[in-house]
Image (cartoon, grey):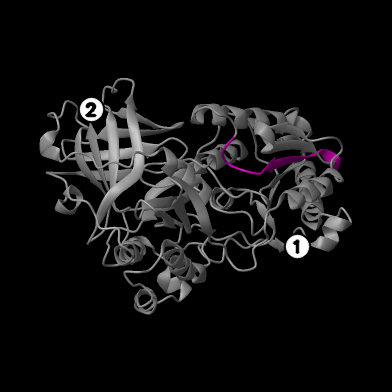
Amino acid sequence: MARIGWGAVTAATAVALATTLAAAAPGVAAPAQDRAPAVSPVDGIWRMDGYGVVAVVAGDKLTTYDVTAHTCVPGWATATRTGTPGPDGATRFLMGNNAVVLTPKGHDRLIDSEEGGVGTKTLNRLPALPPLCTVPAPNDPLSVFDRFWEDFEENYPFFAAKGIDWHAVRDEQRRRITPATTDDQLQQILIDMLQPLGDAHTGLARYVDGRPSPVFGGRRPGTIVRTKELVAQAGKAVAAQLTGPEQVFADGKLGVGRLPDGARYLRVSAFDGYTDGDFAGRAAELDRALDAVLADPDGITGLVIDVRLNGGGSDALGLQIASRLTDRPYLAYRKVARNDPADPTKFTRPVPVAVRPSAGEHFTGPVTVLTSSISASAAETFTQALMGRSPHVTRIGENTQGVYSDVLGKKLSPDFAVILPNEKYLTRDGSTFDGAGITPDVRTPVYSPEELAALKDSALSTARRIIAEEAQGDQGDQGDQGDQGHEGARTRQ
């Protein structure tokens, strides 16, 4: 499962959202005046900058509300306090295997950081729950429709970029709603509104017989569909170029291999789900794979990183790989969230996210990354993080999917829930790759039926050629330096 945060869901899918919703408490928290007095600096009622979330921290529990200008419903996220606060009041909460840390900054502000995520979020104290949150919300078809529309209206940043007039969409689709509209009819109306967005970070889940189930997930038109058959065929095509069997980690989600002429191969098919434990366990499993790929580093001529089958997960795990590929810190990206329900151009203050060199073995020689339209979310933030590396990482294959934001999970009613993005990952010049995705430096076929049938992999072959050319160039440079010495591609912090 993708990392679940209480303000957002990293690389979430409708499946992940539905699983989380099944475990979330559906009840409404008691009004503030009925609770015991605050006993901790994090206790109280808080509104998050952006995200449309109000959080209530009382005793050992954290609960949430999803709020818009005209509605408030109990949110899907709940968490339980664990351990004792740190010297600065930082308090840890667990939600499943994921942890949220709330750190007080004075009396009226909290900073939220989430294991497996990057950046931080800010929460400001409220004197009481918003009045809308103290009464049950109506759940008739029109109310659910309006709640769905308003969740996107106040949080989604990409209507203008996609050429979507969301107000016109509302006017057209709202006419289809009557008091007699069934759940099946409402479901189709909501899907008809999501489909034109072509956004893989949008999705709809529905409760059936008391259990939530995904009913729609967005996708950019023309996207390769990942199937078991495709994964198996792709693996055979890669294996045809390796010098031996892949070494497998993380329940098969990570693979390490050797290529001819001293190059190494790292397959990263997901950025989550490596272990059943907490984030520290997942990070440790990734380190095991990285240690394996960098074993005997003096002989490495270059590294091929393959994220063509990677649909996302934890941004922090992507940064963990990037930290092994540099000997100097650099900016990966800056993260912002839409922060004004009435103005889609206003965002939170940018939070810079850096790649910092690992304390262990790392590699600064030639690196290539293989991408496809399946490469989404954390696979894309990882690719974006590599763009600031020096020397340049050569991107090979196809455009990535074009979705970067952590994903908001919004509960619409006892019958429906929706996911949507509200963040941007900014480049140094303030632009993003949302929608079109990151373009390759070298475009090649990716998983075409003809290539798979012939066990051919043009992207991997091209990566090997580029690494060989760069390695030869480095050897020429080294020879030119003579007795002056040459800094090798391998360093240890």
**Identity of the residue drawn at 26% across and 22% down:** 87
**Identity of the residue drawn at 42% across and 44% down:** 21
**Identity of the residue drawn at 34% across and 33% down:** 79
Q: Hey, what amino acid is under mark 2? A: Gly
Q: Where residue 46 is drawn, which disc sits there?
A: none
**Identity of the residue drawn at 34% across and 59% down:** 338
Q: Hey, what amino acid is under mark 1? A: Thr
Kindly state the secondary structure of the residue where label 1 is placed: loop
Q: Where 95 sits versus 355, above or below?
A: above
Of discs 1 and 2, which sits in the foreground?
2
**Highlighted range, magenta:** 260-273
Residue 263: in magenta span: yes
Residue 323: in magenta span: no
Mark 1 crowd level (few <14, some 14–19, many ≥20, 10 Å Cα):
some
Where is mark 1, residue-wise?
444
Earlier-in-chain disc, 1 versus 2: 2
Kindly state the secondary structure of the residue where label 2 is placed: loop
> Where does the image place residue 464, in percent across and percent down from the top left?
80, 49
Please tell me in which quadrant of the rendered image residue 436 appears: bottom right
Q: Nearer the viewer, residue 202 or 30?
A: 30
Q: Quadrant of the C terminus?
A: top right
> Where does the image place residue 205, in percent across and percent down from the top left?
46, 54
Q: Is residue 292 left or right of residue 25?
A: right
Q: Nearer the viewer, residue 260 or 167?
A: 167
> Where does the image place residue 222, in percent across and percent down from the top left?
65, 68
Where is mark 2, residue-wise?
59
> Where does the image place residue 281, in percent across and percent down from the top left?
54, 26
| Label 1 close to label 2 by CB (< 8 Å) | no
Q: Is residue 427 visible?
A: no
